[in-house]
Amino acid sequence: TMNKAKGAYSAICMVQGVGLVAFRDKHGIRPLVLGQRESKDGMEYAVASEDCAFGPLGYDRVRDIQPGEAVVVTPDGELQCRQLVEGQLSPCLFEYIYLSRPDTVINDISVYAMQLNLGRRLSR
């Protein structure tokens, strides 16, 4: 199914009886990141398109969800990760220039640092 789906996407949805399901296209064009926090009930997980969403909620960035990967957080809070198709990272440059906040990290690259570096190159 991921092999049949064309285009750029990151999806997060709730599936009854399964839990929170998040997945990223096999080219990693759109960002998707996993966060976690410790609570009195154990580890809690969150998924977002930008890691800057985690701080105000008390979550820490864990990692980027890889291209072609799906992550499930079960109703019991168990984290399950599975590579569904072979992925190759080909991110959208617009995410770094126009769409993401400067305090975001995408694919382990600081958006702010990327913007500064691009500005320096343009000024040459």
Image (cartoon, rainbow, N blue to C red):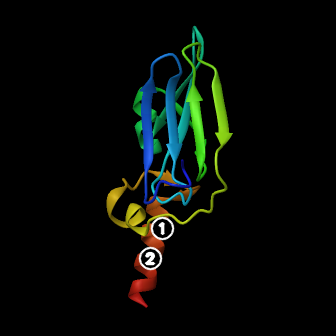
- Work out whether residue 96 or residue 31 is closer to the camera in this orientation and state it: 31
Count the labels in the image.
2
Against 96, residue 22 (above or below) is: above
Residue picked out by circle 1: 114
Place of residue 105 in the rendered image (x, y in percent of width and height, measured from the top left): 50, 52
**Amino acid type, residue under disc 1 in the picture:** Met
Quadrant, the C terminus: bottom left
Q: Residue at x 40, y 85 (%)?
A: 122
Place of residue 52 in the rendered image (x, y in percent of width and height, measured from the top left): 43, 42
Residue picked out by circle 2: 118
Say if mark 2 contacts mark 1, CB within 8 Å.
yes
Image check: 38 left or right of 120? right
Res. 102 in view = yes
Against 116, residue 37 (above or below) is: above
Give neighbour class at mark 2: few <14, some 14-19, many 20+ (Cα, 10 Å): few
Q: Residue at x 58, y 53 (%)?
A: 67
Image check: 80 left or right of 12? right
